Amino acid sequence: MKHYWLNKSGNPELLIFFAGWSFDEKPFEFLNTDGLDVVVIYDYRDLEIDVDFSGYEKYYLVTWSMGVYIAALLRDKLPNFTRAVALNGTPMPIDNEFGIPNRTFDLTLKFAAEGLKGKFYQNVFYGEEQLEKYWKAPVARTIEDRVEELHSLKSWINDKPADASGFYKIAYVSENDKIIPPRNQHNAWEELGVSVIVLPDGHFPFYNFKSWKEICK
């Protein structure tokens, strides 16, 4: 895995953000850090976390899409969180009832390279205005390493189930999510007893917020 500090200025509170598949820090740089140190974790081709989380008084976790599963999988390597929040993802991300249906995921994997040239983002973002915002600060990673990442994610998900019991406090679910069916997200969080906040948005809900603190607090 890779990481990038959006802010590291000695604040007493740290927010750890696990991004979704194929993303990096670039599309999230617009969010105000508001007195929080913020580190972005991304690129799940391996599961090694090379970050020193020590020295903070409080910790917050925000996860999105595939990051919801990865953070739960690695919970024993993470600090204890004051609050852990999931956005448009589930701990069972490839699942006909609780995540992306198997056939849909396999098609995404088969055509990943082509989709990353444009069509994938039409499904991630809700409307042309959001898509235009994204293209002003797009992901900087190569298509090749993002395709490799998706293959790795399928291996992790098949071989390493995540235990998310008691882990997340709040889950946001966008009613217009075209990546992970909202009904399946609701099924997953109901199964885990996690409170849900519904957003009138698509898979990438971050343009609804101005700061990381607004998301996690």
Image (cartoon, rainbow, N blue to C red):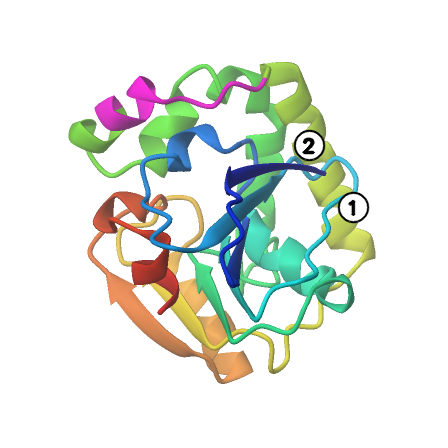
Give coordinates of residue 122: x percent, y percent. Answer: 32, 28
Q: Is residue 101 above or below residue 1?
A: below
Give the residue type at disc 1: Leu
Name the front one of labels 2 and 1.
Answer: 1
Residue 37's tag is none
Q: Which residue occupies the foreground of this view, 157 or 12?
A: 12
Give coordinates of residue 97: x percent, y percent. Answer: 53, 65
Residue located at (66% from left, 64% from top) = 72
Location of residue 2 by image quarter: top right
114 vs 208, left or right, is right
Q: Name the residue under label 2.
A: 149
Q: Which residue occupies the foreground of this view, 113 or 70?
A: 70
Residue located at (75% from left, 63% from top) = 161
70 vs 134, left or right, is right
Quadrant in which the N terminus appears:
top right
Q: Callout 1: helix, strand or loop?
A: loop
Q: Callout 2: helix, strand or loop?
A: helix
137 in the magenta segment: yes
Answer few, some or many: residues within 10 Å of disc 2's Cα (few below 14, many 20 plus, some between 14 and 19): many
Give the residue type at disc 2: Glu
Answer few, some or many: residues within 10 Å of disc 1's Cα (few below 14, many 20 plus, some between 14 and 19): some
Q: Is residue 143 above or below residue 163?
A: above
How far apart in space, not on screen, are marks 2 and 1 (Cα)? 11 Å
Q: Name the residue under label 1.
A: 47
Examine the rendering and report whether any part of residue 101 can be seen.
no
161 in the magenta segment: no
The part of the chain drawn in magenta is 132-141
Give coordinates of residue 205: x percent, y percent. Answer: 31, 48
